[in-house]
Image (spheres, rainbow, N blue to C red):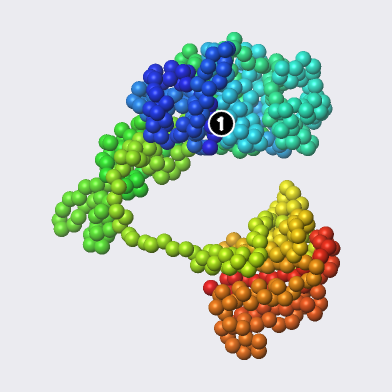
């Protein structure tokens, strides 16, 4: 969850009402957010109280004091939801042409203009902070979307969005005095504590994205930095906002969030002026788009989902508190089948007898989400808002209509029992990574990879985590290496999952619960590992059958395995099916893992014993 830090007095001033800390915490709970912490800071030698408020990750409209205060005022009935309007274009030159090469790096751009805005120190700081929060949230650290804001009075349209060679781009970056080209700019910002984290987004590209105005003045080099020429300040009256992106949907959400939050400071509040975007295919799109997204929601569906029973008028009132607009439409559903009637009887709003048939009356509500509520994407989101406005604490507690008794998953229950018993036998439990390097599972274990065993991680970030482990043994061997300072013998075990490819599985792989034991000492200690196997089988109440004739029994049989010393390896069988191996590890395996003492190991599949 993103956390927003807001000064207490500024927030109460915006709300037009003061609260105690306890009262405001309750208000946050009622609204579906959380007052996480209250801190004190010293500002201009005065003590300032800061509220740290946790915001749902998809509520971008609450990331600044403007949106949060506005939403709380509407929730409390102190303000009507604003109506956002897109006015006419201020000038025919307010358009931007996207050149074909932009498709190679950042293909989309959306723009808007805030006219006659009044900045103060407080709302200017909030304006910048909101952009930073959006960059770290929906913009995914500028990878998907990058925001640029410019003083419209310092630039002149029409604009062009281009992709050029780094050496062809020359401008003075924001807050600098020296003109640089794209290559020099990359070197210059390598040591910048903030911007160095974004350089990789375009550095290796053959072309860099850049926005020019009519006079070939650079507005920005997205997603890195804006130009100094169009820098905004407290004196700025008209703001040109552009968002370049890889994801057009997120770009529109980001643009709408910025302009809906700060259009309230325009001379005509909640209005914005559009910019035409001309793409290479000659398609012209005007942004921003304030069209409301509509959803058809059944009253009975919402009541059933939340567990309440309210009428359509009450639901309209609750939706209004959450800034959602609705148009009510009555729909009558007639059931002639007795079974269908009985199924609907418990969730119906109205019932009428008519001509021997029962009518169940439902209401369809066409709900419209404003441009600030990009989180509303389904009828269940509308139901959630109704629940918040109704108050979850106001929902009457009822006894569930179905009675189910939970239980422990059998495989986990078996796992817990074995962990306890193996620890009682003197072994120390290890908890190793589920991911490991390819070499650990194959090359170092002297096993060939046929490509049909391990689930491989695409574009792995580290050589240590390339595949999902196919055995517990590499993790135990690495644990042994890190335990070299301990006194011998070292006895380890682990009961956990491995991942194996499986063509019959829906996702192409499966988890398999295994138990592994490890012994390392001055001798190989095969008898200890054999004893551990016998103890495990004793706990599982599985008898031993040396001849291998009984079905419900286990036995071991000499075998060869590349990871084990020849003549010192055996397969474990249960119900005449191989379930694992035990034996002395091959000296090459020990050398590969830098282990200097002989080791014996055991690994069996526990799922066969359920």
- Neighbor class of circle 1 (other Cα within 10 Å; few <14, some 14-19, many 20+) is many
Taking the view exactly as shown, the residue that stands out farthest to the top is 235
Taking the view exactly as shown, the residue that stands out farthest to the front is 487
In the figure, residue 422 lies in which quadrant? bottom right
Q: Residue drawn 69% across and 63% down?
A: 492
Who is closer to the viewer here, 389 or 533? 533
Q: Is residue 271 visible?
A: no
| Image position of 165 with respect to 395: above or below | above
Q: Residue drawn 44% across and 24% down?
A: 69
Would residue 396 appear left or right of 54 to someone viewing this image?
left
Q: Is residue 460 visible?
A: yes
Who is closer to the viewer here, 157 or 550? 550
Would residue 96 appear left or right of 15 to someone viewing this image?
right
Residue 514 percent coordinates (x, y) = 63, 67
Would residue 301 appear left or right of 68 to someone viewing this image?
left
Residue 47 percent coordinates (x, y) = 53, 16
Name the residue that disc number 1 marks: 254
Q: Residue drawn 49% across and 16% down?
A: 265
In the figure, residue 498 lies in which quadrant? bottom right
In the figure, residue 72 lies in which quadrant? top left
Who is closer to the viewer here, 478 or 247? 478
Would residue 369 appear left or right of 191 to someone viewing this image?
left
């Amino acid at each position: 969850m993103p956390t927003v830090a807001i000064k207490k007095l500024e927030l109460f001033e915006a709300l037009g009402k003061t609260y105690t800390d306890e009262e405001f915490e309750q208000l946050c709970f009622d609204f579906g957010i959380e007052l996480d912490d209250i801190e004190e800071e010293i500002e201009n030698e005065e003590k300032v109280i800061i509220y740290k408020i946790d915001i749902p990750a998809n509520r971008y409209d609450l990331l600044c004091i403007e949106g949060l205060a506005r939403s709380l005022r509407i929730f409390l009935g102190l303000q009507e939801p604003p109506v956002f309007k897109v006015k006419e274009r201020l000038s025919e030159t307010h358009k931007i042409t996207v050149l074909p090469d932009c498709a190679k790096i950042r293909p989309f751009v959306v723009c808007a203009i805030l006219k006659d805005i009044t900045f103060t120190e407080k709302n200017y700081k909030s304006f910048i902070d909101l952009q930073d929060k959006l960059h770290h949230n929906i913009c995914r650290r500028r990878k998907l979307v990058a925001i640029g804001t410019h003083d419209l009075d310092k630039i002149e349209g029409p604009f062009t969005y281009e992709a050029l060679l780094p050496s062809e781009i020359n401008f003075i970056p924001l807050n600098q005095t020296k003109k640089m080209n794209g290559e020099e700019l990359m070197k210059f910002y390598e040591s910048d504590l903030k911007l160095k984290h974004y350089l990789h987004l375009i550095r290796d590209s053959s072309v860099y994205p850049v926005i020019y105005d009519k006079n070939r003045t650079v507005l920005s080099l997205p997603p890195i930095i804006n130009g100094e020429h169009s820098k905004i300040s407290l004196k700025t009256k008209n703001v040109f906002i552009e968002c370049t992106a890889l994801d057009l949907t997120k770009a529109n959400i980001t643009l709408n969030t910025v302009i809906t939050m700060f259009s309230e400071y325009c001379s005509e509040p909640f209005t914005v002026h559009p910019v035409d975007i001309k793409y290479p295919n000659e398609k012209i799109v005007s942004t921003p788009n304030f069209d409301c997204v509509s959803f058809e929601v059944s009253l009975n569906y919402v009541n059933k989902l939340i567990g309440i029973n309210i009428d359509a008028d009450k639901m309209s009132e609750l939706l209004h508190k959450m800034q959602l607009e609705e148009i009510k439409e009555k729909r009558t559903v007639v059931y002639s089948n007795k079974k269908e009637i009985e199924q609907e009887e418990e969730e119906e709003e109205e019932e009428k007898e008519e001509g021997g048939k029962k009518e169940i009356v439902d209401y369809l509500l066409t709900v419209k989400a404003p441009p600030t509520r990009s989180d509303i994407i389904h009828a269940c989101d509308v139901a959630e808002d109704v629940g918040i406005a109704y108050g979850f604490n106001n929902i009457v507690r009822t006894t569930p209509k179905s009675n189910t008794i939970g239980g422990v998953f059998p495989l986990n229950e078996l796992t817990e029992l074995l962990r306890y018993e193996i620890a009682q036998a003197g072994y120390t439990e290890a908890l190793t990574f589920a991911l490991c390097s390819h070499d650990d599972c194959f090359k170092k274990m002297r096993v060939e990879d046929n490509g049909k065993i391990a689930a491989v991680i695409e574009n792995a970030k580290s050589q240590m985590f390339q595949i999902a482990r196919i055995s517990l043994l590499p993790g135990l061997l690495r644990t042994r290496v890190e335990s070299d300072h301990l006194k011998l013998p070292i006895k380890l075990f682990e009961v956990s999952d491995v991942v194996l490819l499986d063509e019959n599985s829906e996702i192409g792989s499966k988890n398999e619960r295994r138990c592994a034991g490890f012994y390392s000492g001055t001798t190989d200690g095969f008898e200890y590992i054999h004893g551990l196997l016998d103890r495990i089988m004793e706990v599982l109440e599985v008898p031993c059958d040396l001849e291998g004739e009984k079905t419900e029994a286990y036995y071991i049989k000499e075998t060869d395995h590349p990871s084990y010393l020849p003549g010192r390896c055996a397969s474990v069988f249960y119900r005449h099916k191989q379930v694992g191996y035990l034996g002395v590890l091959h000296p090459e395996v020990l050398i590969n893992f830098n282990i200097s003492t002989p080791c014996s190991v055991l690994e069996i599949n526990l799922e066969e014993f359920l």
